[in-house]
Image (cartoon, grey):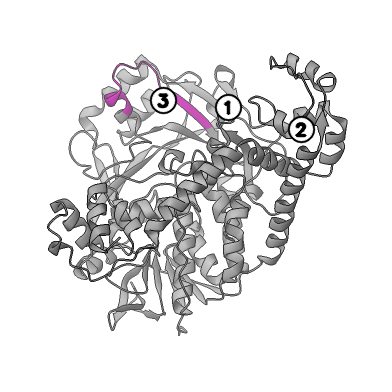
Amino acid sequence: MFPTYDVIVVGAGHAGCEAAIAAANLGAKVLLATMNLQTIAQMSCNPAMGGVGKGQIVREIDALGGYSGIITDETMVQFRLLNKSKGPAMWSPRAQSDRMAFALNWRERLEAHPNVDFWQEMVTGVVIKDGRACGVHTSLGLEIPAHSVVLTNGTFLNGTIHIGEKQFGGGRAGERAATGLTAQLQGLGFESGRMKTGTPARLDGRTLDWSKMTEQPGDENPGRFSYTDTPPLVNQMPCHITYTSKEVHETLREGFDRSPMFNGRIRGLGPRYCPSIEDKIDRFAGRDAHQLFVEPEGRNTCEIYVNGFSSSLPEDVQYKALRKIVGFENAKMFRPGYAIEYDFFPPTQLQATLETRLVPRLFFAGQINGTTGYEEAGCQGLMAGMNAALAVQERDPLVLKRSEAYIGVLIDDLINKGTDEPYRMFTSRAEYRILLRQDDADLRLSPIAAALGVRNMDGRMDRVNEKREAVAAIQRELGNISVTPDQLNGFLEAKGDTPLKQGVKLLTILSRPGISLPELATTVPALNDFLTPYDDEIINLAEVTMKYEGYIERERAAVEKTSRLEGIKLHADFDYNQLKSLSMEARQKLSELQPRTIGQASRISGVSPADVSVLLVHLGR
């Protein structure tokens, strides 16, 4: 009934979709197995992509040939570039998406790919033969053969939904939980745990008083995520801002004795950086109000997402409290918020390829690894799908370094440090932030994807090369154009900047804080004429490259210094217990994780610089 697939992907959320398309774009024959074909690429929580640290990941996915950026551009209703008042390392794109259009677009793209097949059924186990994964078992008793398997089960593994004192099995509202896999994996020796996440109530936008809220528009000149020619965003939809109050908090507290968070029914750890409203009220008892973002679910629906009001309190308490929020006085609820507990597998059980250490050809991606967020899931799916295909083709795997991509930071953090709470990406997690900006992900990563043979990268590489040449040309031009005090002092004095005493090159002026390339172009006609053929993306990248050249070179030097440790190999079967100079914790962690290099060992939680020195001495370094 089934051929032997190169890759079977289990689960069709954000990780599963990217895994399937990534493997297929490397020439693998893929089966995407999901319990419900109608919910492919569902945005289970917030209908948005990107944000601080997350927007950089979406651009990296796009640069590697993934589809999240393209689909976001084609279905977004609002775009904002966050942190614009800070340095370029912090600039983070974010888009409000049309939930239904996003999911439909993903399904259409998957169905259009000749290498992707589909099967709707629960996967209950992985077929293991000769110690490696070679297919899946289904609830109908079928065995589907494959050369590799990628598990992207999201919140469905033994999922339990909590609303007040009610609890029932489910992986998402209206969908059943997945069973069988956890027990099998535990039997194979995998360690598992429980995590918790949640979602807010959905409201009827026709019943809200928008005049009482603060409108939050998108950027005047909206950007995009993809480096391809995706359509420009027109007719942006606004979001709105309102606030909770003391009265709202008191109403919510009335239900705390019925809350599964406070009566012990929920034991899984929730996301620290996206707490429920009851958790915020409890933890920040001194605050009288919390900000709420009121976000549209799409262009053709009145359904509204209340960002910041995630809750598992009883539905009557949620409803009563919501109606005391400014603008929500007559609100009608489509469905209450809820919490969900689910199984995950600590990611220290994975290699850097996202292949499991215990079972070759078995890969994990997404929330099964203890992460949270569409973007974090999508990039793991991309990497797991590519590496599953590469493994079947007996080619070298793709492992991104921390200095190459936020994706590399995320995976390195997971496999070396693990996580005891849902892991979320922030710019602060990357030590080389100026090298990992959102504006140059294509320059960093598209050559890697092209070298691997990812489908349809030829046109992208032409654009990358043109972009690189354009930036170099602009830099040369600013080094060639000289300006006199008469030409520029009026502009500089208007900016409150120090006037010139003699002629200088424009490159020197651009290095001053608060001076932008477009501003200089309005003052220097020769520069304006030169920049006319270039679009804003090229001009912005050129400005950042020139303005922050010193910082960029400093980080590159730090990367070079650190990379020396990555070149010092460690044997997989090394007995760390023989090195008594190592701390006890280091011996335990190193024995458990078996790092492949000194650099990887240095990033393991519990391994100190002194322990690294002991290893270097032992290796004669």
**Going by the image, does 89 lie left or right of 34?**
right
Residue 219, position as x, y percentages in the image: 66, 32
Foreground tag (2 vs 1)? 2
**Going by the image, does 351 lie left or right of 525?**
left
> Which amino acid, by three-letter code, is at mark 2?
Lys
Badge 3: residue crowd in 10 Å (few <14, some 14–19, many ≥20): many
Q: Quadrant of residue 443?
A: bottom right
Residue 34, position as x, y percentages in the image: 43, 65
Closest to the observer: 328 or 619? 619
Sequence-earlier tag: 2 or 1: 1
Q: Which residues are magenta?
A: 280-294
- Is disc 1 in contact with disc 3, using a CB cutoff of under 8 Å? no
Identify the residue under disc 3: 322
Badge 2: residue crowd in 10 Å (few <14, some 14–19, many ≥20): some
Badge count: 3
Give the spatial CA distance, label 1 vs label 3: 33 Å
Which part of the image, by quadrant, shows the N terminus? bottom left
Foreground tag (1 vs 3)? 1
Dot 1: element: loop
Dot 2: element: strand
Q: Which mark is residue 505?
A: 2
Identify the residue under disc 1: 85
Q: Residue at x 76, y 32 (%)?
A: 506
Say whether residue 297 is visible.
Answer: no
Say whether residue 407 is visible.
Answer: yes
Closest to the observer: 281 or 521? 521
Give the spatial CA distance, label 2 vs label 1: 27 Å
Dot 3: element: helix
